[in-house]
Image (cartoon, helix red, strand yellow):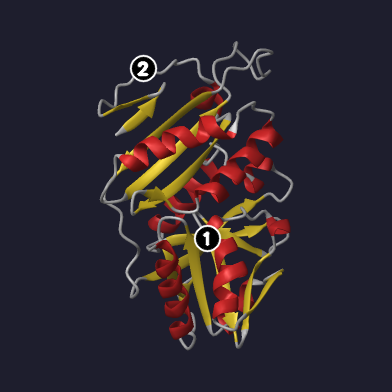
Amino acid sequence: MLWFDGAISNDPRTGFDLRDRGLLLGDGLFETLVVTNGRAFMLDAHLDRLLAGAAALNIPVDRESLRRPVDDLAAALPDGGIIRLTLTRGVGPRGLRPPIDQQPTIFAAASAPWSPTPAAAEVRLVTTRIRRNPSSPTSRYKTLAYLDNVLALQDALDRGADDALLLAAGGQVACTSAGNIFIIEGERLLTPSLDNGVLPGITRALVLNVLALELGLIPQEVNLSKDSLFQADAVFLTNSVALVAHATELDGKPLSRSGRKTVEHIRANLLALMN
């Protein structure tokens, strides 16, 4: 199901200008949202992040123009689903220079149903040679330029793993191909700081600011070495669709499971928030 130009359609061939800079240059942003009970979960937080990215990229857009396609599609998903909302700079002349008179393109796609990653799910990680660039907007904002993530995931799959661990340019732990990473050390809940080229994930913020406190954990944003993952009581991953998944292996070596119950509590409390 697609939303484009104010209308919902089930035809994937909905008209799209092939000169659009989102298609040709990856010049745009996107958000992926889960719909439950007829509403998009954490919609305002997703819109805040998208608008912050649009401001940084100098793409003129207002909040209501971004909210409308999400609300329209969510109403058409009574049993829940996933919505991807895309914003591009729109059509422009050949070359890199942005057009003077920008007319952004907004469209959204929905799929159903959605279900969270099972509590027993385990993720095997391998470290990819692809690094995060802390100075790049493509690390700080959810831009359409996702080729590094695509190649990192393909690298992991080719090596028999489920996902890739990406390090920052200085060697610190950053993230996975499509999510944030956390470790549990006793009563401390640690995650890489945004200075390491980390996308400020919506679920990441919920875990840090709400769920950690509910469970009596001390949340901290720090610089993490890869060795710290092997020393942790548990390692887990978060994103808006999979929610929470336990990482059990890194580069063929086991990661601790001793903190698994805490990870399961975080997941359960997150699901309770969604319902």
Which amino acid lies under the numbered mark 2 shown in the image of this protein?
Gly
Residue 196 in picture, x, y percent from top left: 70, 58
Q: Is residue 229 above or below residue 57?
A: below
Residue 179's mark?
none
Q: Quadrant of residue 218?
A: bottom right
Residue 124 in view (yes/no): no
The residues bearing labels 2 and 1 have C-alpha atoms spaced at a distance of 33 Å
- Residue 88, percent across and down? 54, 27
On the image, the x and y values in percent for residue 64 come to 54, 32
Q: Element at badge 2?
A: loop
Q: Earlier in the sequence, mark 2 or mark 1?
A: 2
The residue under label 1 is which amino acid type? Answer: Thr
Residue placed most toward the observer, 172 or 214: 214
Number of disc labels: 2
Residue denoted by label 2: 15
User: Residue beneath label 1, please?
Assistant: 203
- Image location (x, y in percent) of residue 129: 58, 56
Q: Residues within 10 Å of mark 2 (few under 14, many from 20)?
A: few
SS state under label 1 = helix
Q: Which image quadrant for residue 220?
A: bottom right
Residue ID at (43%, 72%): 267
Give the quarter of the figure containing the C terminus. bottom left
**In this image, 163 relative to 176: left or right?**
left
Residue under the image location 64 percent in, 34 percent down = 54
Relative to 37, say whether 21 is above or below: above
Local crowd size for mark 1, using a 10 Å CA cut-off: few (<14), some (14–19), many (≥20): many
Tell whether 40 sits left or right of 232.
left
Q: Is residue 251 visible?
A: yes
x 35%, y 71%: residue:
121
